[in-house]
Amino acid sequence: MLLPSIFGENLFDDDWMFPFDSDFFGKKNPLYGKHAKNLMKTDVRETESSYEVDIDLPGFKKDEIKAQLENGYLTVSAAKGLDKDEQDQKGKYIRQERYAGAMSRSFYIGEEVSQDEIRAKYENGILRLTIPKKDAKPAVEEKKHIAIEG
């Protein structure tokens, strides 16, 4: 169903009908506001030897993105700075939608994988991480019985 829109905004957006999760309660992402749910969308694909994770990070440069592994959690974060000039040399802003801020997302991949084994490539706004498969160590070792002779 095609919904009417004004300036690309959905006329029936939940924010005007149900403002309970609006800026008043502090739940909006300061980087991209109500459109934050559309960012850092992730696809995870399993191959025979690895997992491939594709994360959408449009508009970011390679040096604005960081990935780190700590205690089995892979955390991808992106931070963007924006020069905010109040007055453009040729006029004033009528609408300004670009912001500065940071966002991150974490995935538990286990403690068997080391940071050196993960490969990352950023191209065309997509960060691709290749994580090798490792056999999980059993949480509790099996109890072995001693044979009793006699």
Image (cartoon, rainbow, N blue to C red):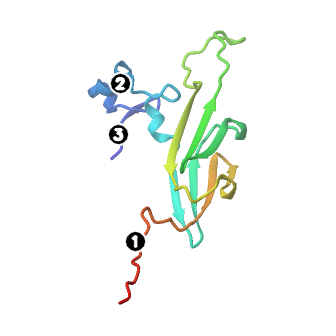
Q: Secondary structure at mark 2?
A: loop
First in sequence: mark 1 vs mark 3: 3
Q: Which mark is residue 22?
A: 2
CA gap, disc 1 and disc 3: 63 Å
Q: Which residue is mark 1?
A: 143
Q: Is residue 70 above or below residue 11?
A: below
Residue at 31% over, 32% down: 14
- Percent coordinates x, y for residue 28 in the rendering: 42, 27
Mark 1 belongs to which amino acid?
A: Lys
Q: Which mark is residue 3?
A: 3
Q: Is residue 39 above or below residue 49?
A: above
Q: Tell me, yes or no, if residue 41 can be seen here.
A: no
Residue at 64% over, 37% down: 59
In the picture as drawn, the residue positioned furthest to the bottom comes out as 150
- Percent coordinates x, y for residue 136 in the rendering: 50, 65
Q: Tell me, yes or no, if residue 24 can be seen here.
A: yes
Q: Nearer the viewer, mark 1 or mark 2?
A: 1
Q: Nearer the viewer, residue 27 or 19?
A: 27
Residue at 57% over, 66% down: 133
Mark 2 belongs to which amino acid?
A: Ser
Q: Disc 3, disc 2: CB below 8 Å?
A: no
Q: Dot 3 surroundings within 10 Å: few (below 14), some, or many (20 or more)?
A: few
In the picture as drawn, the residue positioned furthest to the front comes out as 150
